[in-house]
Every structure is written in structure tokens, then in C-alpha cells.
Amino acid sequence: MAETIIKQEEAKQENGILNGVIWKQILIFFWPILLGSLFQQLYNTVDTIVIGKAVGSNALAAVGTTGSIISLLVGFFVGISSGATVVLAQYYGAGNQEGVSKTVHTAIAMSFWAGLLLTVVGIATTRPFLILMKVPDEILDDAALYMKVFYAGIIGNLVYNMGTGILRAVGDSKRPLYVLIVCALLNVVLDLLFVLAFHWAVFGVAFATILSQLVSAVIIVAMLMRSEGSYRLYLRKLSMDLPILKEIVRIGIPSGLESVVYSISNVLIQTFVNTFGTTAIAAWSAIGRIDVMMWMVMQAYGISVTTFVGQNFGARQYDRVKKCARTGLLMTMVSIVAISVIIFTLCPVFLSIFTNDQAVIEQGTRFLRTISPSYFTFVFVQVYSATIRGCGESVQPTILSLVSICGVRILWLFAVLPFHRTVETVVFSYDVSWAIAGVCYIVYYLKGRWLKRCITRQQKQTQTAKA
């Protein structure tokens, strides 16, 4: 017990997350994550520009229509991996070096085996999913080709994301950025080579992406193997510790299921958008490359809050947990409101980067000006759910999100769309669900007694470990 306390005090002294000025530490941690996300999105943005400009609107629509399906399977694993991030952050904040090491090796092993599974399942379900989504015949083959190539290289994607999560959980957000810069630039070069020089079209874009992700996975694993401290990776130790795996699954499975249901609702929305023709599909794909800036900022703050809350909760600094949530909420809100104004004002200019088709630009402008005024409502969902999950409670926020976002969105599509059948009505389902979810999260955060339950669970786990 005395040794644990000493380690915890040493961690506090060396770790700015546990004792620094919160807003300054969040910014230091946040910026590498955001810049990393920018470079990560460069994969998809370059894909979109090259396909839209060099190949055409049909190819752009084919690549764009695959996103929600890929997210269905990948998102489930990413949700589970968030459980590993929370467990690792809490162990690291508590100074539990053995727990950190076991979590790292369990997480990497899990990502490898999950990648193998997703490769098989993804390739097998590609065409049935696309047909179920009513993807038009003229883009069906290209969409199927893109997805199959992507799934063939998905192990690199999952290992990289898990490795990045490990580094961020211990407070290192810089090295993942360096990896992404290298691999994003590689992706740009490969895109230009495969599409413009080799004329591989959709296959070239997909192949460039998976090669770049494989390189990023190799680099991140090498970084972990050369790291100093308890989170160093040893290949000979790769195995899944059962108690650690259970804790990861307890926290991660609800997040994974939430991601799946999110993806199902997005697949449903994509299906409805598909019924309005290729122009609507291409516009929907293009705006996804624009409002991604808002999501990158939102998610970067969310990751920051989860890490800060997780480490401080592990160190039993409960007042600082609440301060992290308040500070993160304010910083996120200011950023998102500013981005919303920029997107609303300049969306036609942004859309012209991705396509020369004026009909697509006009349709995309209507889409963006429908949803961008409501971005701020999702800030409460992002920050409060990150805070609650960072303390180890995941079932309740998952239920809250599924009902208030996915449930409302699906209800809107089936109850309202038949009476006002326009593509803008489909898009407005986002505004409605975000607003309702924001209110629900505010009420739950203030009145849900979630922190008390998490503290009680933490105390019981400590007592069990002593026994």
C-alpha cells in the first residue's frame, strides 16, 4: 500500500495532467491530437479530391457511400478500444505499473485478432450491405471494390488506432502526430501515383489508404517497443490478461454497441439519401469532408477530456475531475461555435474544392446550412459522455445516446419524412437528435449521481486487490 502511494505521488509530481493548470494542459494535449486528426483526414480528403476531379462524380459517390458501412464494423472495435484507453489512463494515474503493462499487451493483442475477424466479416458482407442500402447500379461495383480493398488492410488501421490510444492515455499526444504526418504525406504521393499515373481509379485510392495505414501501424508498434516505462511493448509478452480484458470489455462494449447503432442510423440516413439520386449522394459525400473539421475538433477535445478525467480519477482527485469537465466544455463550445460560423458562411467555396459539378455544390450548400447551426448542441454530448466514461461508467451514457440520438433520428425518418419528402428533411434529423441529446446529457450529468457510483466501484476494486 505504501509503495502504491509513493508511486502515485511521484506520478502527480511529474505529470501535468494531474497537477498542472487545466486549460493550459488541455491545450498542450489537444493540439497534437487535432493536428493528427487533420493529417488523418488528409487520407480521405485527398481520396475525395483525386476521385472527384480526376475520375468523376460517379466514382466520388461510390467512395462516399461506403463510409457509413465501414464505420459499422470498424466503429465497434474503436468503441471497445476506448475501454482500453480508460483502463490504461486510470492505472497510469494511480501509478499502477503492472496494470499499465498488462493493459498495453492485452490491448495490442486484442486489436490484432479483431483485425483478422473484421477482414473476413467485412469482405463477406460488402456487397449484401451495399445492395441493402439501395446503392445505384452505376456505382455499385466501384463501391464494393473500395470496401473490399479497405477491409483487406484493416489490421493496420486497428493496430495503429490502439497504439495511438495507448500513447494518449499516458499523456503522449505528440508521437502519434509525427506518425500521421509521415503517413498522410505517403498517402498523398500514393494517391497521385496510383490514380493519375497508373489510372487505377477507385482501387488506387483504396490501395493507397491501406498501405499508408499499414506503415503507420508498424511505426506506432516500433515506438511502443522503444518506449521507456511501464507502457513499453514486448512482443514476447503479447497476450490477453483475462481480468484486464474483462474490464476493457465492461467499459468498451457499450461504447462499441453505441458506435454500431450510430452507424446503423447513419446507414439508414445514407439509404434515404441514396433514393434522391447520384447528385444528392455526391453532395452528401462532399459535405462529409467539410464538416469533418468540426468533428475533428470535437473528438480531439473529447479524447483530451477522457484522458484528463481518467488519470485524475485514477489518482482519486475527484474535484479536479469536475474541473476538467467544466474547462473542457467551455473550450469546446467556443471552438465549435467559431467553426460553425465559418462553415455556414463559406460552404460553397469549400464544396468547390471537391467537385466542379454546380448541382452538387448547390445541394451540398443546402445540406451544410441545415445542420451547421446545430453543431453546438452536440458539445454537451461529447464532453459529458467523455467525462462519465473516463470515470469508468459506460452503460448509462450509451443508453442515453442510443435513445436520444439514434432512436430520435430513426423515429424522425419514419414518422416525419413520409409527410415532407425532401432530402433536407432527412438531413434535419441530425439537428433534432443533437438538440434532444444535449438536453438529456445536461440533466444526467447534473442529476445522475454517476460520479458517486464510479467512486464506490473504485473503492471496491481497491479492497478486492488488497484481499
Image: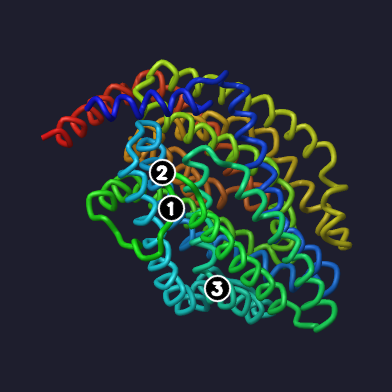
Number of marks in the rendered image? 3
* Percent position of residue 45, x then y: 74, 58
For marks 3 and 1 on the same chain, the one whose residue lies earlier in the sequence = 3
Residue indicated by mark 1: 261
243 and 37: which is toward the camera: 243
State the residue at coordinates (55%, 73%): 153
- As displayed, is residue 38 above or below residue 198? above
Identity, as a three-letter code, of the amino acid under mark 1: Val
In the picture, the disc for residue 288 is: none
In-image side of 330 versus 59 (left or right): left
Identity, as a three-letter code, of the amino acid under mark 3: Gly
In the picture, the disc for residue 153 is: 3
Crowd band around label 3 with a 10 angstrom C-alpha radius: few (<14), some (14–19), many (20+): many
Distance (Cα) linking label 2 and label 1: 7 Å
* Percent position of residue 194, x then y: 77, 78
State the residue at coordinates (65%, 38%): 297
Q: Which quadrant of the structure image shows residue 29?
A: top right
State the residue at coordinates (17%, 36%): 465
Q: Which quadrant of the structure image shows residue 199?
A: bottom right
Q: Is residue 356 visible?
A: yes
* Percent position of residue 453, x then y: 26, 26
226 and 246: which is toward the camera: 226
Residue indicated by mark 2: 402
In-image side of 238 versus 459 (left or right): right
